[in-house]
Image: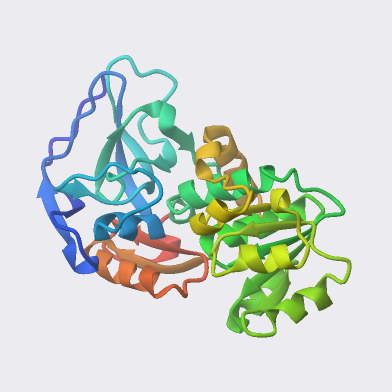
């Protein structure tokens, strides 16, 4: 077994009551120890996801996540393997890895089953890898749910959010024509990525008709806000609509609701390699040190992030310092 670190200064984000970002605290603890069959990861970066703040808010959710107090926080992470428990093979100390561990990711260290880890390919930063688990799996599963290919005209709602921007780019890679709703300030980004931008507003219906005169063939909804009802009214068949955001619409219409649970390690490895090769991009909206976790979630709750918000354990949270 690899010797365990001897220092006892390991931080993690916790909440002991439900509420807004103000309930998040930094707790100091001894460095956790890996049991047989586990590995200890030194976390470098951890992604921020809307589901996180829905969980620590205590609000009712459609998905039956278990919640108890006190709790750690976060799901997405990247880092390096720092120690191996007994009976672990196929991994080595120092390897760069990423993945997801609910309620444990926002910390200096975490202990995890190595079967849940994915190697970070050369050319992909730990900063981006730390934001990839949820959005990567969700984007791949959403695109796969409709077997998108050449000839498809796809609307991606929320096309500059973390899930949306990966989803739209995967559609383009498959030869489809991708349209994406986004704030006008983000239209140049979508155009550069080969995605036709559509502005939110009262004239969205006409803008869709003008951009796709022969109609949409697929809708991949990442934000809700009436996207399902609108595109059904435009003649898109219900079974060609997938929404990860509008549970209420799924209760009223036979649309699909395929999300990240439908994808795993192989899909994450695939999308990580696409990012490493520069074939797709995952913009980083903002980077916050662990001590500023409340500010990171305030930014997420605002709802205007472009790409992903990331928390780092480094003293200075600069993207080019987490390589």
Q: Is residue 269 left or right of residue 69?
A: right
Residue 207 in the figure: left or right of residue 300 = right
Q: Is residue 149 visible?
A: yes
| Nearer to the camera, 40 or 204 | 204
Residue located 47% across and 75% down the image: 304
> Can residue 279 be seen?
no
Query: Which residue does the image show at 52% across and 34% down from the upper left?
Result: 265
Q: Position of residue 254 (x, y in %)?
A: 64, 49
Quadrant into which the N terminus falls: top left
Where residue 11 appears, as percent x and y from the top left, is: 18, 51
The number of callouts visible is: 0
Please state the horizontal and vertical placement of residue 37, each as a whole percent of the image.
Answer: 31, 20
Where residue 294 appears, x then y in whole percent?
25, 68
In the rendered image, which quarter is residue 19 located in?
bottom left
Q: Residue furthest top?
A: 87
Quadrant housing residue 199: bottom right
Image vertical order of residue 316 relative to residue 209, above or below = above
312 left or right of 13? right
Residue 31, compared with residue 13, is above or below; it is: above
Residue at position x 75%, y 54% in the image? 237
């Amino acid at each position: 077994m690899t010797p365990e670190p001897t220092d006892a200064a390991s931080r993690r984000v916790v909440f002991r009551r439900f509420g807004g970002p103000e309930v998040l605290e930094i707790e100091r603890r001894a460095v956790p120890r890996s049991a047989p069959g586990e590995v200890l990861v030194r976390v470098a970066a951890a992604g921020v996801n809307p589901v996180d703040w829905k969980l620590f808010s205590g609000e009712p959710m459609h998905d039956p996540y278990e919640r108890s107090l006190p709790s750690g926080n976060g799901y997405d992470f990247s880092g390096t393997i720092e120690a191996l428990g007994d009976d672990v093979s196929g991994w080595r100390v120092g390897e760069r890895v990423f993945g997801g561990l609910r309620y444990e990711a926002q910390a200096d260290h975490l202990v995890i089953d190595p079967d849940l880890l994915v190697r970070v390919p050369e050319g992909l930063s730990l900063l981006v890898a730390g934001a990839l688990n949820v959005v990567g799996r969700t984007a791949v599963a959403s695109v796969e749910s409709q077997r998108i290919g050449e000839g498809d005209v796809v609307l991606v709602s929320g096309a500059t959010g973390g899930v949306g921007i990966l989803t739209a780019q995967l559609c383009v890679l498959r030869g489809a024509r991708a349209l994406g709703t986004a704030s006008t300030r983000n239209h140049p980004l979508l155009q550069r990525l080969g995605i036709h931008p559509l502005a939110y507003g009262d004239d969205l219906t006409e803008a869709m008709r003008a951009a796709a005169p022969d109609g949409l063939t697929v809708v991949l909804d990442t934000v809700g806000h009436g996207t399902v009802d609108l595109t059904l009214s435009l003649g898109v068949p219900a079974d060609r609509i997938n929404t990860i955001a509008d549970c209420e619409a799924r209760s009223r219409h036979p649309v699909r609701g395929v999300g990240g649970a439908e994808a795993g390690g192989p899909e994450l490895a695939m999308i990580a390699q696409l990012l490493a090769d520069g074939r797709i991009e995952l913009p980083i909206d903002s980077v916050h040190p662990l001590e500023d976790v409340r500010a990171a979630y305030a930014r997420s709750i605002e709802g205007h992030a472009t790409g992903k918000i990331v928390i780092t354990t480094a003293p200075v949270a600069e993207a080019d310092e987490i390589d």
